[in-house]
Amino acid sequence: MDRRTFTLSLLSTAALAGCSSISRDPTRQFRASYGAVTDGGFKIPEIPIRKIDKQYLRQEVDYPTKQRVGTIVVDVPKRFLYLVQPGGKAMRYGVGVGKQGFAWSGNAKIGWKKEWPTWTPPARMIGRRPELKKWAGGMPPGLSNPLGPRALYLTQGGRDTLYRLHGTPEWWSIGTAASSGCIRLLNQDIIDLYDRVKPGAKVVVKQT
Protein backbone atom coordinates (compact mmCIF):
# COMPACT_ATOMS: atom_id res chain seq x y z
CA MET A 1 0.00 0.00 0.00
CA ASP A 2 1.51 3.37 -1.01
CA ARG A 3 1.46 6.45 1.22
CA ARG A 4 -1.46 8.11 -0.61
CA THR A 5 -3.66 5.03 -0.33
CA PHE A 6 -2.74 4.61 3.34
CA THR A 7 -3.64 8.27 4.11
CA LEU A 8 -6.99 8.01 2.33
CA SER A 9 -7.73 4.84 4.26
CA LEU A 10 -7.07 6.58 7.57
CA LEU A 11 -9.25 9.55 6.63
CA SER A 12 -12.06 7.23 5.56
CA THR A 13 -11.87 5.32 8.83
CA ALA A 14 -11.91 8.55 10.85
CA ALA A 15 -14.92 9.85 8.92
CA LEU A 16 -16.83 6.65 9.49
CA ALA A 17 -15.98 6.74 13.17
CA GLY A 18 -17.21 10.32 13.38
CA CYS A 19 -20.49 9.47 11.67
CA SER A 20 -20.92 6.48 13.94
CA SER A 21 -20.37 8.68 17.00
CA ILE A 22 -23.00 11.19 15.84
CA SER A 23 -25.55 8.48 15.10
CA ARG A 24 -25.18 7.05 18.60
CA ASP A 25 -26.28 10.36 20.11
CA PRO A 26 -28.63 12.18 17.71
CA THR A 27 -29.67 14.64 20.45
CA ARG A 28 -26.13 15.89 21.15
CA GLN A 29 -26.73 19.28 19.50
CA PHE A 30 -29.73 19.92 21.77
CA ARG A 31 -28.13 19.28 25.16
CA ALA A 32 -27.32 22.90 25.99
CA SER A 33 -30.95 23.93 25.42
CA TYR A 34 -32.47 21.48 27.88
CA GLY A 35 -30.22 21.40 30.91
CA ALA A 36 -31.41 22.16 34.45
CA VAL A 37 -32.00 25.88 35.03
CA THR A 38 -32.84 28.00 38.07
CA ASP A 39 -35.58 30.50 37.33
CA GLY A 40 -37.75 32.56 39.62
CA GLY A 41 -36.40 30.74 42.66
CA PHE A 42 -37.31 27.33 41.23
CA LYS A 43 -34.88 24.76 39.81
CA ILE A 44 -36.36 23.41 36.59
CA PRO A 45 -35.06 19.86 36.02
CA GLU A 46 -33.06 18.79 32.99
CA ILE A 47 -35.16 17.33 30.20
CA PRO A 48 -34.19 13.71 29.32
CA ILE A 49 -34.02 14.56 25.62
CA ARG A 50 -32.89 11.07 24.58
CA LYS A 51 -36.39 9.91 25.51
CA ILE A 52 -38.04 12.48 23.22
CA ASP A 53 -38.27 12.21 19.43
CA LYS A 54 -35.73 14.82 18.30
CA GLN A 55 -38.20 16.33 15.81
CA TYR A 56 -39.98 17.79 18.84
CA LEU A 57 -36.87 19.52 20.18
CA ARG A 58 -36.40 23.25 19.54
CA GLN A 59 -34.70 24.00 16.22
CA GLU A 60 -34.66 26.51 13.38
CA VAL A 61 -36.22 25.16 10.19
CA ASP A 62 -37.16 26.30 6.71
CA TYR A 63 -40.72 27.63 6.83
CA PRO A 64 -41.94 29.59 3.80
CA THR A 65 -45.19 31.34 4.75
CA LYS A 66 -47.23 34.45 4.06
CA GLN A 67 -47.54 35.07 7.81
CA ARG A 68 -45.64 38.05 9.17
CA VAL A 69 -42.41 37.68 11.11
CA GLY A 70 -43.27 37.22 14.78
CA THR A 71 -46.47 35.26 14.11
CA ILE A 72 -46.97 32.02 16.00
CA VAL A 73 -48.45 29.13 13.99
CA VAL A 74 -49.55 25.98 15.81
CA ASP A 75 -49.88 22.93 13.55
CA VAL A 76 -52.07 20.72 15.72
CA PRO A 77 -51.95 17.49 13.63
CA LYS A 78 -48.14 17.59 13.40
CA ARG A 79 -47.67 18.72 17.04
CA PHE A 80 -45.46 21.67 16.09
CA LEU A 81 -45.45 25.34 17.03
CA TYR A 82 -43.65 27.69 14.64
CA LEU A 83 -42.45 31.19 15.45
CA VAL A 84 -42.02 32.87 12.06
CA GLN A 85 -38.53 34.31 11.52
CA PRO A 86 -37.07 36.42 8.69
CA GLY A 87 -35.78 34.82 5.51
CA GLY A 88 -38.29 31.99 5.20
CA LYS A 89 -37.26 30.46 8.51
CA ALA A 90 -39.05 29.62 11.74
CA MET A 91 -38.12 28.49 15.22
CA ARG A 92 -39.95 25.20 15.67
CA TYR A 93 -41.02 23.72 18.99
CA GLY A 94 -42.70 20.41 19.76
CA VAL A 95 -46.03 20.72 21.57
CA GLY A 96 -48.70 18.71 23.31
CA VAL A 97 -52.24 19.55 22.16
CA GLY A 98 -55.84 19.17 23.28
CA LYS A 99 -57.53 15.81 23.60
CA GLN A 100 -60.22 14.96 21.09
CA GLY A 101 -63.30 16.96 22.05
CA PHE A 102 -61.28 19.75 23.65
CA ALA A 103 -59.35 20.88 20.57
CA TRP A 104 -59.50 24.54 19.55
CA SER A 105 -58.52 26.32 16.36
CA GLY A 106 -58.63 29.80 14.90
CA ASN A 107 -56.81 33.11 15.01
CA ALA A 108 -56.00 34.93 18.22
CA LYS A 109 -53.47 37.28 19.77
CA ILE A 110 -51.17 37.11 22.75
CA GLY A 111 -53.24 39.20 25.17
CA TRP A 112 -50.69 39.12 27.94
CA LYS A 113 -47.80 37.07 29.30
CA LYS A 114 -46.98 35.92 32.80
CA GLU A 115 -43.95 34.38 34.49
CA TRP A 116 -44.69 31.58 36.96
CA PRO A 117 -48.45 31.92 36.59
CA THR A 118 -51.15 30.80 38.98
CA TRP A 119 -53.33 28.06 37.53
CA THR A 120 -57.09 28.23 38.06
CA PRO A 121 -59.04 25.26 36.68
CA PRO A 122 -62.23 26.30 34.84
CA ALA A 123 -65.56 25.46 36.45
CA ARG A 124 -66.31 22.87 33.74
CA MET A 125 -63.02 21.11 34.46
CA ILE A 126 -63.79 21.04 38.18
CA GLY A 127 -67.18 19.55 37.28
CA ARG A 128 -65.43 16.72 35.46
CA ARG A 129 -62.70 16.35 38.08
CA PRO A 130 -64.03 17.27 41.55
CA GLU A 131 -60.60 16.71 43.11
CA LEU A 132 -59.53 20.01 41.53
CA LYS A 133 -62.03 22.00 43.58
CA LYS A 134 -59.27 22.80 46.11
CA TRP A 135 -57.63 24.92 43.40
CA ALA A 136 -60.78 26.89 42.54
CA GLY A 137 -59.10 29.95 43.98
CA GLY A 138 -55.88 29.28 42.07
CA MET A 139 -52.94 26.90 42.36
CA PRO A 140 -49.74 28.71 43.39
CA PRO A 141 -46.77 28.80 40.98
CA GLY A 142 -44.29 25.96 41.25
CA LEU A 143 -42.76 22.96 39.55
CA SER A 144 -45.97 20.94 39.81
CA ASN A 145 -48.17 23.76 38.47
CA PRO A 146 -49.71 22.60 35.14
CA LEU A 147 -48.85 25.92 33.46
CA GLY A 148 -45.15 25.59 34.15
CA PRO A 149 -42.83 28.60 34.37
CA ARG A 150 -44.52 30.76 31.71
CA ALA A 151 -47.92 31.28 30.12
CA LEU A 152 -49.02 33.24 27.06
CA TYR A 153 -52.73 34.05 27.20
CA LEU A 154 -54.73 33.97 23.96
CA THR A 155 -57.42 36.59 23.32
CA GLN A 156 -59.92 37.31 20.56
CA GLY A 157 -61.42 40.78 20.26
CA GLY A 158 -59.81 41.67 23.57
CA ARG A 159 -61.56 38.80 25.39
CA ASP A 160 -59.82 35.88 27.05
CA THR A 161 -60.33 32.66 25.09
CA LEU A 162 -59.31 30.62 28.17
CA TYR A 163 -56.64 28.96 26.02
CA ARG A 164 -52.94 29.34 26.72
CA LEU A 165 -49.52 28.51 25.40
CA HIS A 166 -47.71 27.28 28.48
CA GLY A 167 -45.03 25.05 29.90
CA THR A 168 -45.49 21.64 31.44
CA PRO A 169 -43.57 19.43 33.85
CA GLU A 170 -44.90 16.43 31.88
CA TRP A 171 -42.17 16.32 29.22
CA TRP A 172 -43.41 12.90 28.03
CA SER A 173 -46.68 14.49 26.82
CA ILE A 174 -44.96 16.50 24.07
CA GLY A 175 -46.00 15.18 20.67
CA THR A 176 -49.29 13.83 22.04
CA ALA A 177 -52.90 14.94 22.49
CA ALA A 178 -52.97 15.14 26.25
CA SER A 179 -54.18 18.54 27.42
CA SER A 180 -57.65 20.01 27.94
CA GLY A 181 -57.31 22.21 24.88
CA CYS A 182 -54.29 24.37 25.69
CA ILE A 183 -50.96 24.13 23.88
CA ARG A 184 -48.13 22.90 26.10
CA LEU A 185 -44.38 23.11 25.53
CA LEU A 186 -41.35 21.80 27.38
CA ASN A 187 -40.54 24.14 30.25
CA GLN A 188 -37.24 25.23 28.70
CA ASP A 189 -39.03 25.87 25.41
CA ILE A 190 -41.80 28.04 26.82
CA ILE A 191 -39.15 30.20 28.50
CA ASP A 192 -37.39 30.57 25.15
CA LEU A 193 -40.65 31.38 23.32
CA TYR A 194 -41.75 33.80 26.05
CA ASP A 195 -38.57 35.82 25.59
CA ARG A 196 -39.05 36.02 21.82
CA VAL A 197 -42.66 37.20 21.55
CA LYS A 198 -44.53 40.29 22.68
CA PRO A 199 -48.14 40.89 23.68
CA GLY A 200 -50.21 41.50 20.57
CA ALA A 201 -48.43 38.88 18.48
CA LYS A 202 -50.73 36.95 16.13
CA VAL A 203 -51.40 33.30 16.86
CA VAL A 204 -52.81 30.90 14.26
CA VAL A 205 -53.96 27.47 15.48
CA LYS A 206 -54.56 25.03 12.62
CA GLN A 207 -56.39 21.72 12.91
CA THR A 208 -55.72 20.69 9.30
Image (cartoon, rainbow, N blue to C red):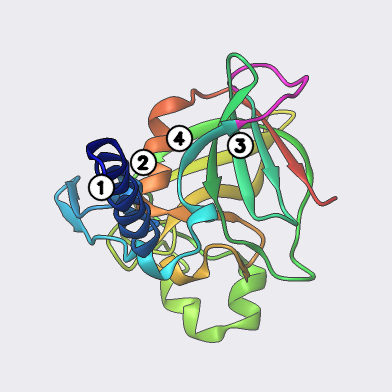
- Closer to the N terminus: mark 4 or mark 3? 3
The residue at 40%/59% (across/down) is 23
Q: Main secondary structure of the magenta part?
A: loop
Mark 4 is on which residue type?
Lys
Mark 2 is on which residue type?
Ile
Badge 1 crowding class, 10 Å Cα cut-off, few under 14, some 14 to 19, many 20 or more, is: few
Circle 1 or circle 4, nearest the eye: 1
- The residue that mark 3 highlights is 82
Label 1 to label 3, Cα distance in Å? Answer: 43 Å
Q: Is residue 97 above or below residue 205?
A: below
**Magenta segment, which residues?**
62-70
Circle 2 or circle 4, nearest the eye: 2
Q: Position of residue 118 (x, y in %)?
A: 38, 54
The residue at 65%/55% (across/down) is 79
- Closer to the N terminus: mark 1 or mark 4? 1
Mark 1 is on which residue type?
Leu
Label 2 to label 3, Cα distance in Å? Answer: 15 Å
